[in-house]
Image (cartoon, grey):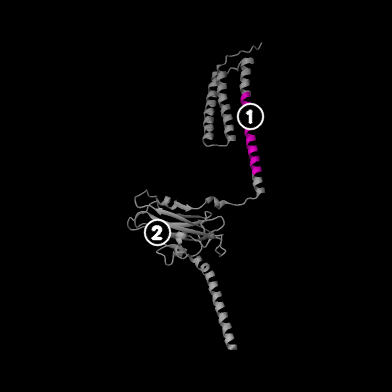
C-alpha cells in the first residue's frame, strides 16, 4: 500500500514537471525564434498580410516609419534591383522585417542579415535584429503586369518581450509593368524611397519649459537688437541726406550759389567721380542681387549716393558763373 502511494505521488510530480516545462517552452519559444526571423504563418494568414500582431498591442503604428529605397517605377524583365529596407523610430533603433511579392512574380534574394522565411514561397525576412538591410529582387523574365509587394517592419525596444514598446507597420507598394512609365537613371533609382508612417513622430520630445522660455527671450532680444539697429541707421541716413539737400538749398538761396570750378579742373575731376559712381552702382547692385545683410546694403547705398552727389557737385560748379573778388 505504501509503495502504491509513493508511486502515485511520483506520477503527480512528473506530470506537474511536464506541464510546467510545456508552459515555459510555449512562453519562451517565440522569444527565441523571432529574433532570427518570423514564422511564415501568423494566425492562419501569412505574416506579410497580418503583420507582427504579437508586438505593439497587436495593432500597426504610425510611430515607426517603414521605408524601402531602390524601387523602380516599372521593371525591366529579368533585371536585378537592389532594395534597402529601413526602420525609423524616435526610441527604437532596430528590429526586423518581412517582405514578399504576391504570387511570387519575381525572385527575392536575401543579403547580409536576412534570410528566406522557412515554409514560405520565397519571402525574405531578417536573420537577426538590425536595420538597413539590403536585399535583391529579380524581375520576372516576361511581362506579368504590375507586381505588388507587402513589407512588414517592426521596430523593437530591445527588452526581449512582446509589449506595447514595440512598434510595427505594413507598407504596400507595387512596381508597374515594363514600358508603362518612364525609368529612373541609376542615381535617381537609388534615391527613390517609398515609406509608410508619420515622420513627425520621429522628432517628438518633451522640452524643458525653462529652455523654451530662454529661447523665447533670446529671440525677443535678438529681434529688438536687429530692428533697433535697422531703425537707427536708416533714420541717420535719412537725416544725412536731408542735411545735404538742405545745404544745397541754402547755398543757392542765401550763399550766392556754388563756387565756380574751372573746366581744366572740372573735366578730370568729373571723369574720376563718374568712374567711381559707376563702380559704386555696380557694387550696390551686387549687394542687392546676392542678398547681403541690410547693414552692408545701406552702407554701400549711402556711399553710392555720395559718389553720385560728387558728380552732380562737379557739374554744378563747372556751370557756375565766375566770381571775381575785388582785392583792393
Label 1 packing within 10 angstroms: few (<14), some (14-19), many (20+): few
Identify the mark nearer the N-term, 2 or 1: 2
Magenta residues (range): 216-242
Name the residue beneath numbered marker 1. 235
**Is any part of residue 71 visible from this angle?**
no
Q: Position of residue 175 (x, y in %)?
A: 39, 53
Q: Position of residue 246 (x, y in %)?
A: 63, 21
Q: Viewer-proximal residue, 155 or 185?
A: 155
Snapshot quadrant of residue 247: top right
Q: Residue 99: x, y in percent?
A: 44, 60
Determine the secondary structure under disc 2. helix
Characterize the magenta stretch by its predominant secondary structure: helix
Please say if 303 is above or below 46.
Answer: above
Q: Is residue 71 magenta?
A: no
Foreground tag (2 vs 1): 2
Residue 285 vertical position relative to residue 182 in the rendered view, above or below: above
Which quadrant does the C terminus fall into?
Answer: top right
Circles 2 and 1: CB distance less than 8 Å?
Answer: no
Per the image, the residue denoted by label 2 is: 102
Q: Horizontally, is 23 left or right of 172 in the view?
A: right
Q: Residues within 10 Å of mark 2 (few under 14, many from 20)?
A: some
**Distance Cα–Cα, label 2 vs label 1:** 72 Å
In this rendering, does residue 242 appear at all? yes
Whole-percent x and y of residue 243? 63, 23
Amino acid at each position: 500500500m505504501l509503495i502504491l502511494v509513493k508511486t502515485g505521488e511520483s506520477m503527480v510530480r512528473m506530470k506537474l514537471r511536464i506541464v510546467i516545462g510545456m508552459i515555459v517552452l510555449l512562453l519562451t519559444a517565440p522569444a527565441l525564434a523571432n529574433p532570427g526571423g518570423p514564422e511564415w504563418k501568423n494566425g492562419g494568414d501569412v505574416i506579410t498580410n497580418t503583420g507582427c500582431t504579437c508586438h505593439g498591442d497587436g495593432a500597426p503604428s504610425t510611430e515607426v516609419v517603414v521605408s524601402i529605397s531602390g524601387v523602380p517605377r516599372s521593371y525591366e524583365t529579368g533585371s536585378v534591383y537592389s532594395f534597402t529596407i529601413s526602420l525609423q523610430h524616435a526610441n527604437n533603433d532596430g528590429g526586423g522585417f518581412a517582405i514578399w511579392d504576391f504570387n511570387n512574380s519575381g525572385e527575392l534574394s536575401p543579403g547580409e542579415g536576412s534570410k528566406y522565411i522557412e515554409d514560405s514561397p520565397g519571402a525574405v525576412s531578417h536573420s537577426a535584429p538590425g536595420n538597413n538591410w539590403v536585399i535583391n529582387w529579380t524581375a520576372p523574365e516576361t511581362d506579368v503586369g504590375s507586381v505588388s509587394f507587402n513589407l512588414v517592419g517592426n521596430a523593437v525596444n530591445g527588452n526581449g518581450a512582446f509589449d506595447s514598446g514595440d512598434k510595427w507597420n505594413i507598407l504596400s507598394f507595387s512596381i508597374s509593368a515594363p514600358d508603362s512609365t518612364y525609368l529612373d537613371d541609376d542615381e535617381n533609382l537609388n534615391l527613390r524611397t517609398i515609406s509608410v508612417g508619420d515622420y513627425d513622430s520621429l522628432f517628438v520630445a518633451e522640452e524643458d519649459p525653462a529652455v523654451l522660455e530662454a529661447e523665447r527671450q533670446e529671440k525677443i532680444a535678438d529681434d529688438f537688437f536687429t530692428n533697433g539697429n535697422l531703425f537707427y541707421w536708416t533714420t541717420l541716413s535719412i537725416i544725412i541726406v536731408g542735411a545735404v539737400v538742405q545745404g544745397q538749398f541754402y547755398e543757392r538761396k542765401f550763399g550766392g550759389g556754388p563756387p565756380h570750378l574751372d573746366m581744366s579742373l572740372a573735366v578730370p575731376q568729373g571723369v574720376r567721380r563718374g568712374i567711381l559712381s559707376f563702380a559704386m552702382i555696380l557694387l550696390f547692385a551686387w549687394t542687392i542681387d546676392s542678398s547681403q545683410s541690410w547693414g552692408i546694403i545701406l552702407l554701400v547705398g549711402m556711399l553710392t549716393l555720395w559718389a553720385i552727389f560728387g558728380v552732380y557737385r562737379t557739374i554744378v560748379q563747372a556751370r557756375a558763373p565766375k566770381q571775381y573778388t575785388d582785392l583792393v
